[in-house]
Image (spheres, helix red, strand yellow):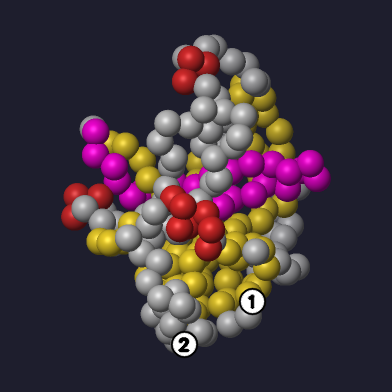
Amino acid sequence: MIATSEGGTVDDGQVRLETAIGKMDRASMEVRYRVTNGLEWPILLLTPLPQFDEDTLRGVPGRVYTYVDPEGILHITKRLWLMPDDIDVVVPEVPFATEVLPRKAFSERFTLSLPVKLELPYLLEPEEFDKPREELFGVASGVVFSVGYLSEEHGPLRFGPADPDSGASLTVRYGVAAENQRILEGGLLRIGVPVKDLAR
């Protein structure tokens, strides 16, 4: 389920997403967002995204998935990315979760280096990771931020607390998140953003 709107604010029923671009210069761009839970039960934001650091899986608040759509819009997202059917995935990449209690809000800001490197999980088979590829540069004509969340209306969807060394608070299972994820997709922010991709 995806809720969208034009502008920097979107409501999915009683869950509200506000997005904005903060400081931006030639080297970096700051993204700010705030999610307000107007429901009577908790929601679980699917952030931070995971990353291995010296064999320890940690939550990285500044990590995001990024891609450019056919209209040339840069999408910046934090969510569970579903495993593709055409690539053999041994272990799925599952975000950590952050609880937002009823009538409470969660705010976060992070900085992306420019040009933004396009990144999604599962794009390449393992044997392709080390192959040299040409860098491609361009300018996206706008930015959309989105975040996935789980609604605990009918009971807990969390698996349990995260490892204290992970820097995150909660964990979720891939299957539960895949079945129950909702996406809050913010409005289009009209700003040119340089991007960098690798030829595949």
Q: Give the foreground label among 2 and 1.
A: 2
Q: How many marks?
A: 2
Q: Identity of the amino acid at label 1?
A: Asp
Dots 2 and 1: beta carbons under 8 Å?
no
> What range is drawn magenta here?
55-79
19 displayed left or right of 103: right
Q: Residue furthest top?
A: 132
The location of residue 188, given as percent across then percent down, is: 72, 60
Q: Nearer the viewer, residue 57 or 152?
A: 152
Q: Main secondary structure of the magenta part?
A: strand
**At 52% from the left edge and 85% from the top edge, which residue is drawn?**
38
Q: CA distance from mark 2 to mark 1?
A: 16 Å
Q: Depth check: 89 or 132 in front?
A: 89
Quarter of the image for residue 164 reads bottom left
Q: Residues within 10 Å of mark 2 (few under 14, many from 20)?
A: few
Residue in view at x 60 percent, y 62 percent: 183
- Occupied quadrant, residue 66: top right
Whole-percent x, y for residue 67 in the image: 64, 41
Give the answer, above or below, for where 76 lies relative to 182. above
Q: Where's residue 92, x and y in %?
A: 44, 40
Q: Quadrant of the C terminus?
A: top right
Residue 98 seen in render: no
Q: Secondary structure at mark 2?
A: loop
Residue lying at 79% horizontally and 41% vertically, measured from the top left = 70
Task: Locate residue 183 relative to residue 108 in the image: left or right.
Answer: right
Would you say residue 5 sits in the magenta stretch? no
Residue 73 magenta-drawn? yes
Q: Earlier in the sequence, mark 2 or mark 1?
A: 1
Q: Which mark is residue 40?
A: 2
The percent coordinates of residue 29 (x first, y second) are 54, 50
Looking at the image, can residue 95 be seen?
A: yes
